[in-house]
Amino acid sequence: MAERSEQVALPIGAVPSTALATPEPSEGSVGLVAPQRMTLPEGLSLACGAQLAPVEVSYETYGELAPHRENVILLCHALSGGAHAAGKHHPDERKPGWWDLYVGPGKALDTERFFVICINVLASPYGTTSPLSLNPATGEPYGLTFPPITVSDWVELERAVLDRLGIERLYAVIGGSTGGMRAFEWAVRYPARVQKAIVIAAPARSSPMVIALNHIQRQTILMGLMQAGEAGAQRGLALARMLAHLSYLSDEALWHKFGRERHPESDFWGITFQMESYLEYKASTFLKRFDPYCYLYITRAMDNFDLAATYGEGDLNQALNRVEAEMLFISFTSDWLFPPAGQEEAVQTLQRLGKRAQHVIIDSPWGHDSFLVERVKPQLKPILKAFLEGTTPSQTPLQAVGLHAP
């Protein structure tokens, strides 16, 4: 029997009663970590029909692999993330990996229990083969000659890496945003290889709103490229990032952080408000770590994500009937990019099919990016930890942390 859908909205800062009653184990850091690399000489057969070879892959691991390899968690990064999920590469690094809040000893993805692996996807600029890589046929960077990439291709790359490492089955796969898309697709594409799946802020298909926003972002990059070459593409990427960053936030969060505060050095046609200054700052820092061509390919892969089309001939019931994993969906009340309704559709479909699926909605004003925000950790951590460490299918995260639907 499917579990009853639980929709729980917790105010920011609230901690479940059992979390208060039971002392939390102390948390630690994974410390200094080193990026790892793997070459797939045979490459990958892509969904578009092209053969991409060779393929270089960047990945990182945390924790110890159990003797029988039964403790593996695949952590899937989002659009602008990479394989560096926790710890630091150098002691003087300003920030740790992108999900250091949740990966480490005593944390939600407890590295004293689990072996966590995060694999950088195709078309990302952080070490895996991308438009920045040299095309062996020409000796020049691929650029816009790079083949089209899909979420399925990303899953296939992760599958190829795990196969090379001798990992046949995942204890869990987890991801947020585009990483959530991959986590969801893993459960559908390879049902026998996934025991548990956590899908955070990601539906079964990209919405018209997502497609529209991505289209505008790509056009700013392409227009810049046509008008002013590489420099124009960089400015186009800056504008694209400003629009994307807004979609990750919420109106409430922007009022709270900026309101209508004016910039001290006002420029009528430039920066007048602190909100504008913030966007320019976020764009400038993004340009230091990302690439316009990579952005084009990754956003198009997001647009084409549709599990019903890929696995069910347009029928979501047919696609999700493949699922065998126990699934947890987590969404946030203020997320207007991937709102809770999209995940609820998937959960209800899974439950009608008799699958084990639950939906937790966290009340957060921080928008789509809530799963990256430290102030959400008091709510998110116990839900993740209980689901991952539950020993029986009936031990749901809501039962384990003592939450109740209103």
Image: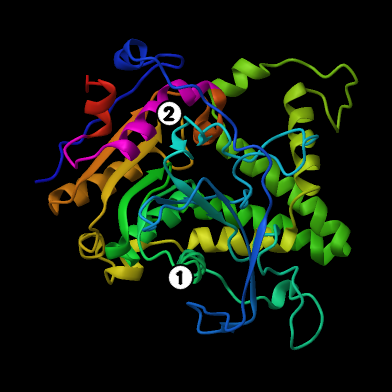
Residue 369: where, in percent of width, then height? 54, 35
Residue 277: where, in percent of width, then height? 79, 28
| Most foreground residue, 85 or 261 | 85
Q: Which residue is mark 2?
A: 381
Q: Earlier in the sequence, mark 1 or mark 2?
A: 1
Q: Give the numbered dot on residue 230.
A: none
Q: Is residue 359 magenta?
A: no
**Image marks 1 and 2: residues in contact by CB distance under 8 Å:** no
Identify the image quadrant of residue 340: top left
Residue 229: where, in percent of width, then height? 86, 65
Q: CA–CA distance between discs 1 and 2?
A: 30 Å
| Most foreground residue, 41 or 287 | 41
Residue type for callout 2: Lys
Main secondary structure of the magenta stretch: helix
What range is drawn magenta here? Answer: 375-395
| Most foreground residue, 319 or 23 | 23
Q: Is residue 193 left or right of residue 48?
A: left
Residue count near mark 2 (Cα–Cα under 10 Å), binned few <14, some 14–19, many ≥20: some
Hey, which residue is sitting farthest bottom in the picture? 137
Residue 66 appears in the rendering: yes
Residue beneath the point at 81% across and 66% down: 226
Residue type for callout 1: Asp
Identify the image quadrant of residue 113: top left
| Most foreground residue, 208 or 254 | 254
Question: Image height check: is 375 above or below 301?
Answer: above
Q: Is residue 376 magenta?
A: yes
Element at label 2 = helix
Residue 271: where, in percent of width, then height? 83, 29
Residue count near mark 1 (Cα–Cα under 10 Å), binned few <14, some 14–19, many ≥20: few
Q: Which residue is mark 1?
A: 163
